[in-house]
Image: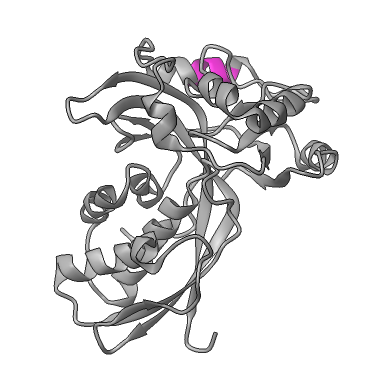
């Protein structure tokens, strides 16, 4: 690890997710609230004096050509004409394919960190635009704070969220996002909501001592379809619901429950089924790398 610098890449959850329409190009229009968690991948970067961009370790199941970290570095290099390169080592903790944004967060951290290490001085807006070319969730991690999101997820407004802990469980199954969005049973015309309504209901439904209650009218529109196709997700969600208003993040497979404090979260997580991966995390108010950009 000599000469590598470490940068955190936090996970996210979707506190709700509504599909409100579809664009002519096939992309689905959505509304969601992204929340950052203090559970991280770590990206190690070693800038070099030549243009080569390469991985310093293999990521199981992710060919180098498909690696969002490599793609992010190459995109930044091409956009700026930078003649420097980098070696990238990724320490994965966030479950892959779990709806927790790990790959997108990794890519955003690469953009944020290399913008500094390569002394490129791009603005946050420029990085947001680059991030969108890599994936719809990438801009959120560059944005820097919890956000109300619309469009395909790139139209972001800051939102204040109360302090909370989360139990996050991931069953041993890979959910195909494309399959879920193509499913004819998916509700694609949810009534659009406004941010103040979400915030108001969030204040009224303060977390009680036993578990979370985010707001019943703000749901994950993908959850019903995912649970019908993936029994392991359904079973995991049903188990967690015994403790409160649990729900699925993104297109799954991870599910989560908001609770009032770390003690409750740890108690629930310690009782989880042995076949399920799980962790406890606190909600963050801002991205740990927010200070890299003015």
Identified at 39% across, 62% down, the residue is 67
Q: Is residue 11 depicted above or below 84 in this figure? A: above
In front here: 245 or 225? 225
Q: Is residue 183 left or right of residue 120?
A: right
Q: Is residue 172 above or below residue 45?
A: above
Residue at 76%, 27% in the rendered image: 239
Q: Which residue is more in the foreground, 4 or 285? A: 4
Please give left or right for residue 215 compared with residue 160 in the image. Answer: right
Q: Where is residue 8? Give x, y as percent.
A: 51, 63
- Residue 152: within the magenta? no
Whether residue 83 sits left or right of residue 158 in the image: it is left
Is 225 located above or below residue 230 in the figure?
A: above
x and y, in percent, of residue 178 in the image:
39, 35
Numbered range of the magenta stretch: 199-203
Image position, residue 32 (x, y; %):
42, 28
Q: Residue at x 38, y 21 (%)?
A: 19
Query: Height in image: 65 above or below 222?
Result: below
Image location of residue 86, percent across then percent down:
34, 79
Q: Quadrant of residue 146?
A: top left
Using the image as rendered, state which of residue 107 and residue 264 is in the foreground.
Answer: 107
Main secondary structure along the magenta-highlighted residues: helix
Q: Quadrant of the N terminus?
A: bottom right
Looking at the figure, which quarter contains the C terminus? bottom left
Whether residue 288 is visible to the viewer of this picture, yes or no, is yes
**What colouring style does the render use?**
one colour
Task: Say which quarter of the image contains residue 84.
Answer: bottom left
Q: Quadrant of residue 117?
A: bottom left
Q: Is residue 292 visible?
A: no
């Amino acid at each position: 690890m000599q000469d590598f610098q470490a940068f955190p890449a936090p996970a996210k959850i979707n506190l709700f997710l509504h599909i409100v329409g579809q664009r002519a190009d096939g992309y689905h229009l959505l509304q969601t609230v992204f929340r950052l968690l203090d559970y991280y991948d770590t990206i190690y970067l070693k800038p070099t004096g030549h243009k080569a961009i390469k991985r310093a370790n293999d990521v199981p199941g992710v060919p180098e050509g498909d690696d969002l970290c490599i793609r992010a570095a190459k995109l930044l290099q091409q956009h700026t004409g930078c003649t420097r390169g980098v070696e990238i080592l990724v320490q994965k903790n966030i479950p892959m394919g779990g709806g927790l944004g790990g790959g997108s967060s990794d890519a955003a951290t690469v953009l944020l960190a290399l913008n500094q290490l390569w002394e490129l001085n791009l603005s946050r807006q420029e990085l947001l635009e680059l991030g969108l070319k890599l994936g719809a969730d990438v801009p959120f991690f560059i944005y820097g704070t919890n956000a109300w999101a619309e469009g395909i997820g790139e139209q972001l407004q800051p939102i204040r969220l109360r302090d909370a802990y989360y139990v996050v469980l991931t069953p041993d199954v890979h959910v195909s996002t494309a399959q879920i969005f193509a499913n004819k049973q998916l509700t694609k015309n949810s009534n659009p909501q406004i941010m103040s309504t979400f915030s108001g209901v969030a204040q009224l439904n303060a977390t009680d001592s036993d578990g979370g209650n985010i707001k019943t009218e703000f749901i994950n529109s993908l959850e019903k379809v995912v649970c019908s196709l993936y029994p392991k997700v359904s079973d995991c969600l049903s188990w967690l619901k015994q403790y409160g208003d649990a729900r699925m993040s993104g297109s799954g497979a991870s599910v989560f429950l908001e609770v009032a404090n770390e003690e409750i979260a740890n108690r629930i997580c310690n009782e989880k089924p042995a076949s399920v991966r799980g962790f406890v995390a606190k909600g963050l108010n801002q991205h740990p790398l927010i200070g890299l950009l003015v």
